[in-house]
Amino acid sequence: MKKFKYTILSFAAMLAMALSSCTGDVLDKESVNSFTQDNVFQDINLLEAYLYECYDQLGGNDGSVLGMREDLLSSSTDETLNIHRAGSVVFLKNTLSPSNLGMFNYPNWPSYYGWLTWPVLYRDIQSINTLLGGADDVPTSNSSEEAKLSQIKAEAYFLRAYEYTNLLRSYGGVVLMDKPFSLKDDFTNVTRSTLQETVDFILKDLEKAIAGLPDKSGIDQGRATKGAAGALKSRLLSFVTGELMNGTFNAGNDLVHFSSGSREERLRAAKTAAKDVIDGKYGTYSLAQYKEGEPSADMSDVDFQGYIDNYAGIFLQKGEWNDEAIFGVQYLDQVGNTAWNNLWWGPNGYSCWGNNGPTENLVRKYEMADGTPFQWDKYKPGDNNVRAWTAEQLAADPERNPYNGREARFYASILYDGATWANRETASNIIDIGSHYTATNGASYLDSDLKTIHDFGEGTAVKIGGVDSRSASKQAWNGTKTGYYLRKMLDPEIENAEAHSNTNSWMEIRYAEVLLDYAEACIELGEVAEGMRYVNMVRNRAGLPSKSTSCTQQEAREYYRHERQIEMMGEGDRWFMIRKWMIAEENVFNVSPTYINHFADGVTIVYWDTTTMTDERSWNSNGCAYWLPIAKEEINRDPALQQNPNYD
C-alpha cells in the first residue's frame, strides 16, 4: 500500500510548478485558500493537491500534522508535565480566561495546542469550504475522473467533520459554516449554534463522507476512509454522552448542554456507532495482538516481552499499518511535515529535551503484571512516599523496586531509573535518573521518613548525578522534573535525535478507542457484562487478566475509566475524558518529583518528595474550564458571538 505522505509531496511539487507563474510560491502561504481558484478548479489533479494541503493543516500548519508536537495535550492533564512551559498550561492553573488562553492561544503558541484553537480550526474549515464550494465546477472527462471528484468531496466532508468535532469537544456549540466566507460578508452578527445543532451538522458531514469514501483497501494509507469516518462518528457520539452535557452543570445553556432528548438515547446512538465499526460495516479492523484471548497466569519472560513489544509497536509503525490503525499519519525523516518526538521527549542523556514527563500519580496507576493494583506502601504500610531496600532484600524480592513486576504497558510507555533503552556511545543504555552516593552508606536511612530523606538529599553529601538527571553533565536543564520520561511513541532505532526526525506514525484514531467507546456505552446503559467483555479485550491484549463481568455498574465504570487512561496515555484522550466525565477536580494534582538515591553499600531509596513542588496546579471552583473560552479578540470582532458560561 502506498504511503500518503509520498503522494502529498509529489502533488504539492506539481501544484507549486503549475501556479508559480501567476501566484509566486503559493506553498509558503498560510492558508490553502490563497491558491488561485481559476487554476485549482479547472483541473482535477490540482484539486486533489489542494485537498492534500487541507490534510496538512490538521495539525495547525506549523510543520506538524495531527498529534505529534513538542508539548503534548497530556500535559494539560494528570498524565504528564510540560517541563519547559508549565506556567502557560493555564488549564491547570485556575487562570484560564478569554484574555489568558496560555497554550490554547494562537498565534502565540502555534507549535503546541494551535490545532485546538478557535482561529486555527476556522481557518482550516474556511479552506475546506473553499474546496467544497468550487469542486462541482471542476471539469471531468471520464467516469474515472468523476469518481475521483466524488471521493475528493467525501474526503473534504470527513476533514470538515474532524475539525468540527474538535471544536465541539473544546467549546460546545459553535458557528456552523457550510460555505466559504468572503471579505464582503458581515462578521459582526455571527452567532453560535446549539450543541444539538452542531452535533447534527457534523453527523450530516459524516454520512456524506461514509457514503462517498472507499474502505482502506481502496485508497492510499493516511487518507480518509469509511472506517475513519465511522470511527470519528463513534468518537463524537461517545463524547456527547458525558455528564458535562447531560447533567446539571449549565443545564439551561443550550450552547453547552442538551435541551432535549435523553442521555439514554445518546448512549444508544453511541453504542450503535461503535458497534458498526466493530462489526466490520466499514472495513476490517482489529486489535494488534501478540496472543489472542486470556493471557497465561504463569507466562514466560519471552511471552511477557512479546506483550510489551506488541503494544509499543502500535506506535512505531513505519510501513503498511496493521488493522488497529484507523486514521493517522506517517512521517518521513526531515522531509515534508516532520515530527521530532525522540528529540522533544527523550532523556537529556541522549541530548534530548525531556518534555512531557509522566507524573508519579500516573506511574502508580499502572497495575502489576498479574492484574492487581500497584501498592507503594506494601513494605511499609502508611508510607506512600519512601521505598527503600538493600541489595540482599531486592535479590530475595525483586518487587521491592517499584518498577519491577509491573504490567506490560508500563514498560512500553514509561522510561524510569534502570530501564533499558536505546544504545548510546558515551554511556550505558540503562536510563540513569538517580543520584549515586559513592562514598556514603545508606543503611542508616532504610527506615527514615520523608523529611529525613529530603534533608539528606538537600545536604552536602558528595554525589554523582545520573546521566539522565537534572544534575547530569549533559543538558541538565532538559532533565526530567518528575523522575520519569515518556517511552511511548519514541523510536529506539534513532541513534541521533538531533539529526534525524521520527519516521513512525501518529495514530489519531485506532481500534482500541472504538472498543472502549462501545464498552462505556454498554456500561452506562446497565449492560455491564457486555461492556466488561470489551474492556477485557483491551486488557487481554496488554497481557492482563480479565476483570469480572459480574461486577456492579459503579465498579465497571471505575475499571473502564482506569483502562481507558492507561491504554490511551499520552495520546490526548485524557484531556477530553476528564472534562466529559467532569472529574477534573479530583484529578488535578500538584506535581512533585520522584528521586532515586543509590548508595555505596547497595542500598537504594526511591522517594516521592511531596515536600517539593515541581508544578503547582489547581482547578477553578466554578468549573468554567470544562469548556474553553472564546478569545477576547474574537468576541471583540463579533459582539454577537456568545461567550462560554462562567467566564465573566
Image (tube, grey):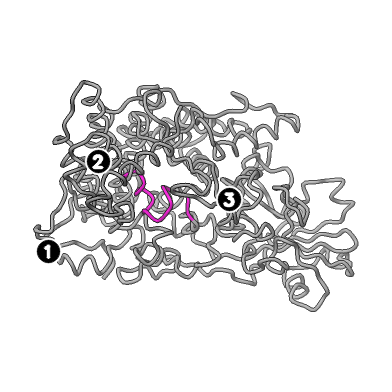
With respect to residue 268, does 189 lie above or below?
A: below
Q: Report the magenta residues as a range.
A: 54-69
Which percent across, then down, holds residue 565? 51, 46
Q: Farthest residue in the front direction? A: 21
Viewer-closest of 113 and 627: 113
Which percent across, then down, holds residue 482? 62, 62
Residue pointed to by mark 3: 500
Q: Is residue 59 magenta?
A: yes
Dot 3 and dot 1 residues touching (CB under 8 Å):
no
Viewer-closest of 461 and 504: 504
Residue pointed to by mark 2: 202
Q: At numbered mark 1, what does the secondary structure look like: helix, strand or loop?
A: loop
Q: Is residue 377 magenta?
A: no
Q: Would residue 116 be found to the left or right of residue 618 on screen? A: left
Structural distance between the alpha carbons of marks 3 and 1: 47 Å
Q: Residue at x 54, y 36 (%)?
A: 318
Q: Residue at x 61, y 45 (%)?
A: 491
Q: At numbered mark 2, what does the secondary structure look like: helix, strand or loop?
A: helix
Structural distance between the alpha carbons of marks 2 and 3: 39 Å
Q: Residue at x 24, y 53 (%)?
A: 23
Three-letter residue code for mark 1? Thr
| Sooner in the amino-acid sequence: mark 3 or mark 1 | 1
Name the main secondary structure of what is drawn in magenta: loop
**Residue neighbourhood size for the residue with mark 3, other residues' Cα within 10 Å, grouped as few (<14), some (14–19), many (≥20):** some
Please name which of the two marks, 2 or 1, marks the residue nearer to the observer.
Answer: 1
Number of disc labels: 3
Q: Quadrant of residue 354?
A: bottom right
Q: Which mark is residue 139?
A: none
Residue pointed to by mark 1: 188
